[in-house]
Amino acid sequence: MLINNSIGSLANLYSTNTASRQSTRTQTVRSFKDEMMLSSEAQTFADMLKKLRQESEVRVDKVNEYSAQIANGSYYASSDDIAASMLGLRY
């Protein structure tokens, strides 16, 4: 039959047409590059934050002060201060 031969031709035509559409799509895809600019205030804040992160979280001067007070027996904390500190309250 002649119909079977033309169906095969149409199938080949369709597969090549699909491939050419796909290559056309890939050519029209654009590449965009994101950019970000910081204001001078944001840059100053970023610099200060970087410096803070580099510093130690332990305040050695306070540790030495309280250690000396505990060692010589002069350190005193009231029960109200201890309770407030435990509950996260500040006067």
Image (cartoon, rainbow, N blue to C red):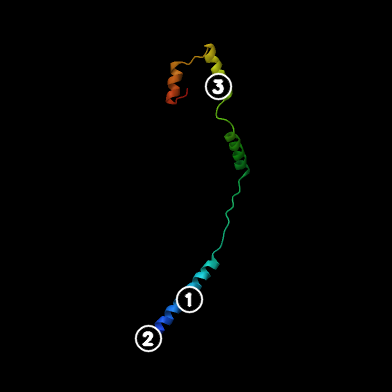
- The residue labelled by disc 3 is 63
In whole angstroms, how far apart are the C-alphas of marks 3 and 1?
78 Å
Identify residue type, mark 2. Ile
Pick the front one: 41 or 46: 46
- The residue labelled by disc 2 is 3
Q: Residues within 10 Å of mark 3 (few under 14, many from 20)?
A: few
Q: Residues within 10 Å of mark 2 (few under 14, many from 20)?
A: few
* Residue 71 x/y as whole percent: 53, 14
* Residue 22 x/y as whole percent: 49, 70
Which residue does the image show at 54% across and 15% down from the upper left? 69
**Vertical comparison of 37 with 31: above or below:** above
**Vertical comparison of 74 with 6: above or below:** above
- The residue labelled by disc 1 is 16
Closest to the camera, between mark 3 and mark 1, is 1
In whole angstroms, how far apart are the C-alphas of marks 2 and 3?
95 Å
Pick the front one: 18 or 28: 18
2 and 3 marks in contact (CB < 8 Å): no
Name, please, the residue furthest toward the top.
Answer: 73
